[in-house]
Amino acid sequence: MSTLHLMQLVCGQANKVGLSFGAMLYNDLSKLRVTYSFELTKWISVTVSGPDEELAADLLTKKYGKLHDVQRGDIIRAWLAEINDTDLALDAGGKRVLVPQSKLKQLGRGTALQVALRFGFIRCLPLEVQLVEENDADLTKNQIDTLWRWKRGTDRINVNNATRAQIHAVLKRSGHIRDIYAIERLGILEHSIVCKHGTDAPGLIPIIGPLLESELGCIRGDNTSR
């Protein structure tokens, strides 16, 4: 039997995290000869046992990473906790790290808050960072490239604290499922709604927002006609 403490923050309502992560874990492990269970604290722990437990442990470690105290030079996934004018604060392993405004210049002009609004940042958004000092981090080139890919596409709406099924149901109920290309998974309860060409995300937010217990972040895509 192996217990893995994963680098996966519990962000959002615990019952929703459990429901969504349980489905993800089933998809990951259902074809292996293991039994498994998981526990939610601040982070997620998974216990696996059976003939394929070593393979299962390797798979989960590769996908989520092991929880550890991050060190200078580490490239990790961290979760956005706070946004203000001067920096972004993220939960990264055993510490809180900051991405200062000066490190966000590759995303354009403005304060950290203005950059965050431009790229649809919301709390619990997972971002790839590299720790450069004890508590300071940079967004990786891969993460910056991803954000610019979002910006150069059609409009998007980033959503936290919602399962994919909930988002799909709300879009269908509101009559706007036809206005989106896809719902991309970013984390356990974090998703990005990719709008179709010509769909106006700021106009969609007041319609679906009241139906979701979520924060919504809007990205005005360069490839959407107004």
Image: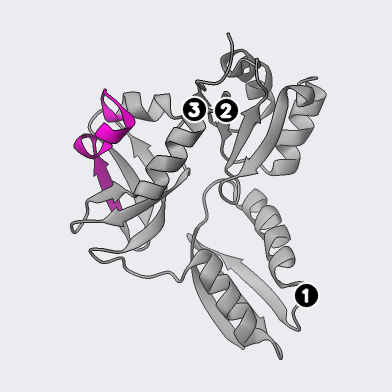
| Residue at numbered disc 2 | 156
What amino acid type should be assigned to the residue bearing mark 1? Lys
Quadrant for the C terminus, please. top right
Give x and y (percent) for residue 12. 55, 46
Image vertical order of residue 104 relative to residue 46, above or below: above
Residue at x 18%, y 57% (from the top left corner): 133
Image vertical order of residue 168 relative to residue 94, above or below: above
| Residue at numbered disc 3 | 152
Between 123 and 195, which is closer to the camera in this rendering? 195
Number of the label disc, if any, that sits on residue 109: none
What amino acid type should be assigned to the residue bearing mark 2? Arg
Asked if the magenta segment contains residue 187, the reply would be no
Residue at x 52%, y 65% (from the top left corner): 64
Give, as a single range, the part of the protein colored magenta. 96-112
Asked if the magenta segment contains residue 99, the reply would be yes
| Residue at numbered disc 1 | 31
Tell me if label 2 and label 3 are in contact, CB under 8 Å: no
Label 3 SS: helix
Label 2 SS: strand
Which quarter of the picture shows residue 92?
bottom left
Position of 125 with respect to 131 (left or right) is right
